[in-house]
Amino acid sequence: MRFAFIFAVVLGAVPLGAAAQDAQTLADIRQELSILNVEMSKLKRELSTTGTAGGVQLATSVLDRVNAMESELSRVTAKTEELEYRINRIVDDGTRRVADLEFRLVELEGGDISTLGETTTLGGTDQATAPAPAPTPTNTTTQLAVGEQDDFKRAQEALASSDFRTAADKFATFNQTYPGSPLAAEADLRRGDALQGTGDTREAARAYLASFGAAPTGPTAPETLFKLGASLGALGQSSEACVTLGEVPARFASSEFAAAAVAEQSKLGCN
């Protein structure tokens, strides 16, 4: 069964000013800045004397102006990279929040939660103009902000010590403090575990859904989907639970949670 999301969020139009008239992406701007930087370096070399022209020297004011322009180009390039990073993190965080809102709306309206699937990236994607994605780094720790790893570790320690309420609060605070973090999906997954420990199965299910929406094909996805299905079963939503659990072996046949999902379906009496 196709696992497709039903969008129910209406986003207000925000004036974009000059950006609406310019189809350039940040990657395009960065490329142009890099080209300009190279050209400025060439110009600077042409303005520099080799000391073999009989003592004739160029005006130092010209060199100063070139240096100033080169410095400004470097500043703008760095600012562009910073903005690109912030935009990517905001998009990731917004997508995760939309997934949670969808779950809440479908639940409030009495819809079928099992029909929820992967959330479309906030803002959509334009394959014709979007720059190619950067290679996935093998070590995510290089992407973490200062203190990010420590905050996540403290939340894990609270969960390991069975201090479930503190752990749930710390994982929630983590995702608020570091939106779009590489650890966001796992933080929501462990927040769901902590909420289960407090007996709040409904909020745990929402946390599992947020985790799956943040990384539907990530390393935590099989566990998240299994626990979401099990939570729905515990909430008495057997039909939705059976469909959700059925997606685990369908999507992640080699995962250890595939067999666990089949066993849970048997326990719920799924057809």
Image (cartoon, helix red, strand yellow):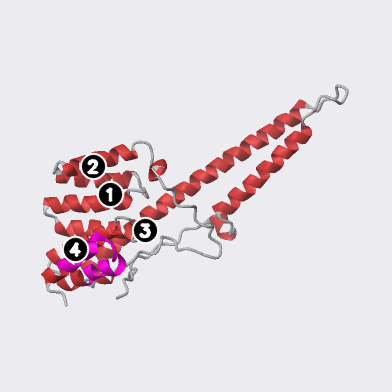
Q: Quadrant of the C terminus?
A: bottom left
Would you identify the image quadrant in which residue 113 lies? bottom left
- Crowdedness of circle 4 by 10 Å Cα count: few (<14), some, many (20+)? some
Q: Is residue 102 magenta?
A: no
Residue behind mark 3? 95
Left or right of 75 on screen, residue 243: left
- Crowdedness of circle 3 by 10 Å Cα count: few (<14), some, many (20+)? many
Q: Are marks 4 and 2 in contact (CB under 8 Å)?
A: no
Residue behind mark 4? 260
Q: Position of residue 54 (x, y in %)?
A: 88, 23
- Which numbered mark, 2 or 3, is in the foreground of this view? 2
Residue at (18% x, 41% y) in the render: 158
Q: Secondary structure at mark 3?
A: helix
Q: Main secondary structure of the magenta part?
A: helix
Residue behind mark 2? 155
- Magenta residues span 243-264
The amino acid on which the numbered mark 1 sits, given as a three-letter code, is Ala
The amino acid on which the numbered mark 3 sits, given as a three-letter code, is Thr
Residue at (66% x, 36% y) in the render: 70
Of residues 41 and 169, the one drawn nearer to the viewer in this rendering: 41
> First in sequence: mark 3 or mark 4?
3
Left or right of 107 on screen, residue 251: right
Q: Are marks 1 and 4 in contact (CB under 8 Å)?
A: no
- Residue lying furthest bottom: 271
Residue behind mark 1? 187
Q: Are marks 3 and 4 in contact (CB under 8 Å)?
A: no
- Which numbered mark, 4 or 2, is in the foreground of this view? 4
Q: Using the image, tell me which numbered label, if any, was put on residue 108.
A: none
Q: Position of residue 261 (x, y in %)?
A: 20, 65
The amino acid on which the numbered mark 4 sits, given as a three-letter code, is Ala
Residue at (36% x, 53% y) in the render: 93
